[in-house]
Image (cartoon, grey):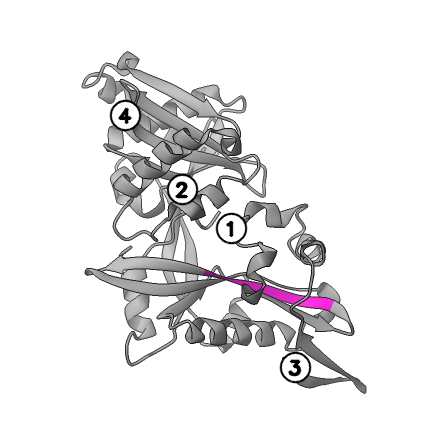
Amino acid sequence: MKGKTITNKDKVAEYFRDFNVSIDEIKLLTDICFQKKDYIQNFPQVFDIQNKEYLFCIKHQNKLASFCSLYPYSFSFNNTRLSAYCIGSVCTHPKMRNLGIAQFALNLAEEKAKENSADFVFLFADNQKLYSYLNYKYAGQMFLAPIGSYHSGKKNLNSLIDTIKNIENKYCISDYSFMYFKNISEINFQEKSSIWRFIVKNAPRSETILSFLEFLSIVKIKNMSVYILCKENKIVSLCFLDKGDDFQNVIHSPYFIKTEFIVILLYNILSTLQNNNLIFFPGSNQNEFKDIFDFLKTPSLSIKSLDEKKFPTNELINLCTKNSLFVSSLQGT
């Protein structure tokens, strides 16, 4: 598929989608654009060359100039299954920007989503000017709580310690065992299955639906750890830890039977970390922790309906604002 002709300072060239781009070419472009080595290793469920029809590679002057991916998500709302696609890893080589190439890639991704009868598309925006031009709208907020011994995390740390003291009056914490797997890709199949079943059973209803096959792909991510709290060999809470772009410890995707159990787990994690600092992403569960932590807020995602008559964008925004639709941090890792 070919794009329009570019005219720029008397230079004329054509850009087109190439279905035969290698993963190594994509890796080179994404590493340059995101300034992060081995960027694609964080998304093993997405960067599968066998799904190349969902990898939109745009060539310009015989070089990979722009790229985006398309990945399916399902939501359950009012007993209705909603189909959506995330347009991810949108990037254009720094020397080939402002030529309309990224827009061409995004349009192709949208058309594929429509072809598959999706209700809407969304992306995690870093170029709001472009996305606004393409009629994407901000939707929802992302909450994070710094917890640690310095700066903004100190207040949250003290609050966590006070909460633990109150929990100790209700629970015998020594009855609970603390488990840690540094690299979850090395966990055996039975343990992975147990973790997935616990996630599915305790996930908020608003979260994206996580299949077991998708979970098996996600756990291939290197350097993503899992922390688990058990009682009598049964999981009562768990969460995941990654190193963020600023090299801070990021705790995300908490799943739990009771709020107290994830608080106990957080306290144990903090006790094991050498630098004693972390950032906690509660996902759609932030209301469970509003009396414990002061959260910082940032825009979550940008969204666009593919059928305004069936499901208007403004209605989607309202659902995201209410956390009635929420992309799991685990799936968005």
The outermost residue toward the top is 174
Which is in the foreground here, disc 2 or disc 3? 3
Q: CA distance from mark 2 to mark 3?
A: 41 Å
Which of marks 4 and 3 precedes in the sequence? 3
Residue 331 x/y as whole percent:
43, 49
Which amino acid, by three-letter code, is at mark 4?
Thr
Q: Is residue 248 above or below residue 12?
A: above
The residue pinned by badge 4 equals 163
Which residue is pictured at 67% across the width and 55% down the height?
A: 23
Which amino acid, by three-letter code, is at mark 1?
Gln
Judging depth in this view, the residue of 133 and 215 nearest the camera is 215
Which amino acid, by three-letter code, is at mark 3?
Lys
Which is in the foreground here, disc 4 or disc 1? 1
Which of marks 2 and 4 precedes in the sequence? 4
Residue 318 x/y as whole percent:
28, 65
Q: CA distance from mark 1 to mark 3?
A: 28 Å
The residue pinned by badge 3 equals 2
Residue interval drawn in magenta: 64-71
The residue pinned by badge 2 equals 281
The residue pinned by badge 1 equals 45
Q: Secondary structure at mark 2?
A: loop
Q: Secondary structure at mark 1?
A: loop
Q: Please rate how many residues cluster around mark 4, counting C-alpha atoms within 10 Å: few if below 14, some from 14 to 19, many from 20.
A: some
Q: CA distance from mark 2 to mark 1?
A: 21 Å
